[in-house]
């Protein structure tokens, strides 16, 4: 895929061990989010416990959240260094590592922009994640205008992706009009296809709908294909990114598109061992029978049609609120992990 099509692979983690192996498989970027960052730190205590202690000693007045976020920033900078040569080769379009803004800031445009600028300054090949809500999209537009390459997150639907693509395009045009460089910026717009599938499965169970369960595995793929088609037709300079993998089709059905697939490391291992021929399938439409069945679910229609939702509705869509709550919980989990390190419970 990475050698014979324009589709590129980014690793869905900034874990240096996983990223190093993924790069040997052709990976040219990395993504991360609060859940992934917390999981990486938790599963590597031999590395991160002493590092968090060192951060706490270096920042003697810092609270748990500041110490935890410093660990995330350190992880990001190290991953960025690993990808720097790739970044130069692709002139900024790839070779980037994502770092996500603090989900606790999701209601505050100015705070999101300020943190995006802070993260942007960590390394030349940073790409910053901001949620694709009404507030987040406004923040993405402003941050893009100010030179930050953006990766939209908490994004599951075609209307969200299109709204972000339009906002980024407006910001790029504004920069160009003022003589500011956009040549090495590399914005991407995530559609978390598997999380759309997850939500629709809950809706089907809640509403007691009868539908072939295999068809529900195609909802995210359909949204990704539709989003890619719209981006291509409208000439957006941002690229679609496929994330939140639940099945191989969220990779195999997108091959051939000028887009990013960002599976977790374990999914890359499965894909490499699958025997699936990585041929171009991006222009192969989803079976009309599957689409017709999915269109019986109102929440699929809202996710699939370009005008299926307004920006005011994005944050209330099921996948969005579910995921945002998970990201907020991961922040709390990281705080708790740091607390256990710097204020260990007494022996009893």
Image (cartoon, rainbow, N blue to C red):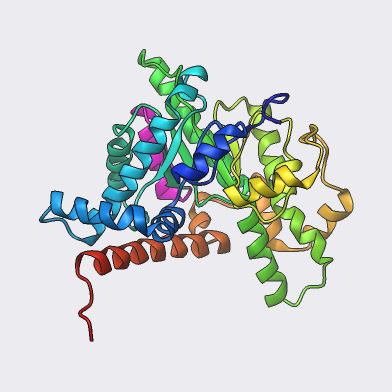
Q: Quadrant of the C terminus?
A: bottom left
Q: Is residue 15 left or right of residue 198?
A: left
x, y (%) of residue 6? 67, 25
Q: Which residues are magenta?
A: 132-148
Identify whether 140 is placed above or below 186. Answer: below
x, y (%) of residue 109? 33, 46
Q: Is residue 267 visible?
A: yes
| Residue 328 figure quarter | bottom left
What residue is shown at x 65% (from left), y 44% (from top)?
306
x, y (%) of residue 146? 33, 28
What residue is shown at x 58% (from left), y 48% (from top)?
265
**Depth check: 14 or 132 in front?**
14
Label the magenta part by its dominant secondary structure: helix
Q: Is residue 189 left or right of residue 281?
A: left
| Residue 106 figure quarter | bottom left
Q: Is residue 308 visible?
A: no
Residue 239 belongs to magenta span: no
| Residue 231 figure quarter | top right
Residue 144 belongs to magenta span: yes
Question: Looking at this rendering, what residue extends furthest in the right direction?
Answer: 289
What residue is shown at x 52% (from left), y 59% (from top)?
320
Identify whether 348 is placed above or below 211. Answer: below
Question: Looking at this rendering, what residue extends furthest in the top direction?
Answer: 179
x, y (%) of residue 62? 15, 56
């Amino acid at each position: 895929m990475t050698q014979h099509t324009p589709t590129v692979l980014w690793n869905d983690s900034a874990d240096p061990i996983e990223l190093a192996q993924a790069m040997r498989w052709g990976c040219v970027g990395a993504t991360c989010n609060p859940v992934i960052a917390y999981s990486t730190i938790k599963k590597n205590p031999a590395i991160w416990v002493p590092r968090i202690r060192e951060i706490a000693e270096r920042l003697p007045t810092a609270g748990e959240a500041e110490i935890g976020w410093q660990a995330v920033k350190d992880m990001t900078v190290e991953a960025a260094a690993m990808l720097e040569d790739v970044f130069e080769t692709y002139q900024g379009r790839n070779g980037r590592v994502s770092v996500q803004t603090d989900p606790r800031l999701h209601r505050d445009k100015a705070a999101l922009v300020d943190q995006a600028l802070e993260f942007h300054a960590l390394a030349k090949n940073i790409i910053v994640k901001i949620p694709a809500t009404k507030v987040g999209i406004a923040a993405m537009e402003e941050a893009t205008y100010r030179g930050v390459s953006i990766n939209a997150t908490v994004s599951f639907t075609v209307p969200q992706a299109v709204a972000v693509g339009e906002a980024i395009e407006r910001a790029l045009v504004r920069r160009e009009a003022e003589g500011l460089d956009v040549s090495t910026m590399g914005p991407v717009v995530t559609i978390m296809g598997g999380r759309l599938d997850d939500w629709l499965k809950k809706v089907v169970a809640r509403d007691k709908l009868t539908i072939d369960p295999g068809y529900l595995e195609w909802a995210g793929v359909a949204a990704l294909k539709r989003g890619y088609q719209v981006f291509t037709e409208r000439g957006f300079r941002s690229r679609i990114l496929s994330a939140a993998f639940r099945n191989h089709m969220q990779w195999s059905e997108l091959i051939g598109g000028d887009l990013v697939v960002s599976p977790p490391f374990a999914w890359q291992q499965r894909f490499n061992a699958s025997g699936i021929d990585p041929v171009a399938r991006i222009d192969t439409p989803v079976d009309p029978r599957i689409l017709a069945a999915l269109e019986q679910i109102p929440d699929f229609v809202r996710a699939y049609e370009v005008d299926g939702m307004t920006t005011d509705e994005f944050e209330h869509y099921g996948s969005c609120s579910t995921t945002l709550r998970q990201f907020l919980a991961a922040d709390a989990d990281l705080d708790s992990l740091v607390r256990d390190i710097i204020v260990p419970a007494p022996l009893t």
